[in-house]
Every structure is written in C-alpha cells, then in structure tokens.
Amino acid sequence: MSAFGYRKPADLPQTLPLFPLAGAILFPRGVLPLNVFEPRYLNMVDDALGGERLIGMIQPAAGQDDVATPRLTHVGTAGRITSFSETDDGRYLITLTGVCRFSIEQEAPLLRPYRQARVAYDTFADDLRPAEGRIDREKLRHALRAYVDNHGYEADWSAVDDAPTEALVNTVSVVCPFDPPAKQALLEASSLEDRCAALIALLEWGADDGPRPLQ
C-alpha cells in the first residue's frame, strides 16, 4: 500500500508550497529533518499543517546570485510533515517524509510570503510504491568503503549491511557531501538501478578528494 494513502498521482495536490534549499534532497520514503526559522517558511509550515501537510522540497538552480528569489531546478519531492515541534525561540523542528517527486509546470503568483507552484507527478508515478531493482550491493559497499576511508569518515557497516536496498542507496545519496548539481542528478535518476550506478560513479570519482565535513 502507498504511504499516507496516496495511490496515484491524482491523489496528490496540484499546487504545492515550495521550500528551496541548496544541497537538500528528499527521496520517496526518505526522511529529512528541517530547522525552520525564516518567517515566510514558518508561515508555510503553519499553512501546511492546516491543510495537506505537504511541502515541496526543491533545490535552487546552480550558477546564480539571486538569493531572495532564485531560479529553481525543475524536479523536487513532495514531503509530508510527519513530526513537528516548536522551540522556545519560535523555530519549528519538523521532519518531512518523502511521498513522490514532481516537476514544476508553472509557478503561482506570489500571494503568500512563500513560493508555490503548479506541479505534475505523472512522470514519477512509480514513486508511490517501493522501488525494486537489481543492485550490486557489493560494488556499492566497496565504493562507499573507499570513499569513507579516503575522507577519514566513519560508517556503521552493520547498519549498511542490514539496510534495505532502496534505503541504503537513498541514504548514502543524501548524507555524502556531493555538490548540489550531483545531488540533483541523483534525485532525477529514472530508476533505483540508475541512481545506484550514478552514486557508485560519484563515490569512485570522489574517493581521492580531500576530507570534507558530512552534512
């Protein structure tokens, strides 16, 4: 059964509030914790909690200087607010659980403090059921081991070995400090096999880079 009762693209809202955040990607069935403090996004969370509880996570497009209203990538993920708390200083700590990727059809007029867009899910209808595919887990593990060792990171290898394949591929894609365009390419991969192949290539390519902090 699909998460949250969404069985087909028509079950999802045609308009989503957008949360642009560079380097942050959300996969279907994945989770993304967020610390929300800007007033416009506090307003967005309030509105989402009073409605569908869905927020569109999306990255700004690469190579631009407009911080206030950046151009956006074409593909993001609708995430449902699955946990919420408020801090003493007025921030919201929320967790989004990924439901389905979407493509932006047209941004809506700015009638709220935050951006919204009309979106389409049809291309990503398969997101509404668990991904299946034949993945070479040993090749992925070997590439991840080399990447971790060369960067001086630590990994819980028992957790790596025990993780379901989809969760493993997507979690590694999220936590490794690839640049935003690389993360976007992983997000837009058409299948789990394609994402895993791209992930292995990124791990192998980055194995000899200098250490960088994990996100």
Image (spheres, rainbow, N blue to C red):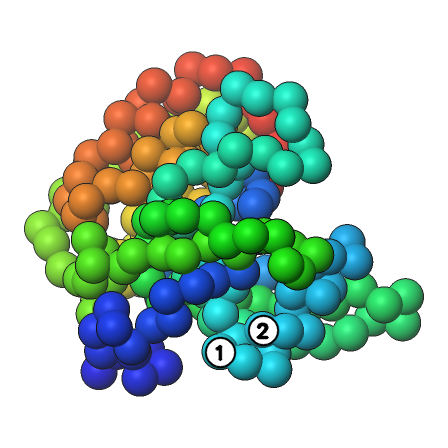
Q: Residue at x 53, y 60 (%)?
A: 17
Name the image quarter holding the C terminus. top right
Left or right, 191 with reference to 178: left
Q: Which mark is residue 65?
A: none
In the rendered image, the vertical position of residue 79 relative to residue 177, given as above or below: below
Q: Position of residue 22 (x, y in %)?
A: 56, 38
Q: Residue 82, image x and y in percent?
A: 53, 76
- Whether 143 is drawn above or below 57: the answer is above
The residue pinned by badge 1 equals 52
Towards the viewer: 205 or 98: 98
| Residue count near mark 1 (Cα–Cα under 10 Å), binned few <14, some 14–19, many ≥20 | few
Q: Residue at x 85, y 68 (%)?
A: 90
Give the quadrant of residue 188. top left
Q: How many marks?
A: 2
- Residue 97 visible: yes
Q: Which numbered tag is attached to residue 48?
A: 2
Q: Quadrant of residue 145?
A: top left
Look at the numbered disc 1 and give the secondary structure of its residue.
loop
Q: Please determine whether, in this image, residue 77 is positioned above or below residue 173.
A: below
> Please, which residue is most extreme toward the left here?
134
Residue type at the position of mark 2: Ala
Q: Amino acid at mark 1?
A: Glu
Identify whether 215 is placed above or below 163. above
Q: Secondary structure at mark 2?
A: helix
User: Quadrant of the image for the N terminus?
Assistant: bottom left
Across and down, in percent, residue 151 comes to 51, 26
- Contact between labelled residues 1 and 2, with CB atoms less than 8 Å apart: yes
Residue 98 in the image: x percent, y percent? Answer: 41, 64
Residue positioned 72% across, 66% down in the render: 43
Q: Is 156 or 189 nearer to us in this picture?
A: 189
Q: Which quadrant would residue 67 be assigned to in this image?
A: top right
Relative depth, front residue between 6 and 74? 74
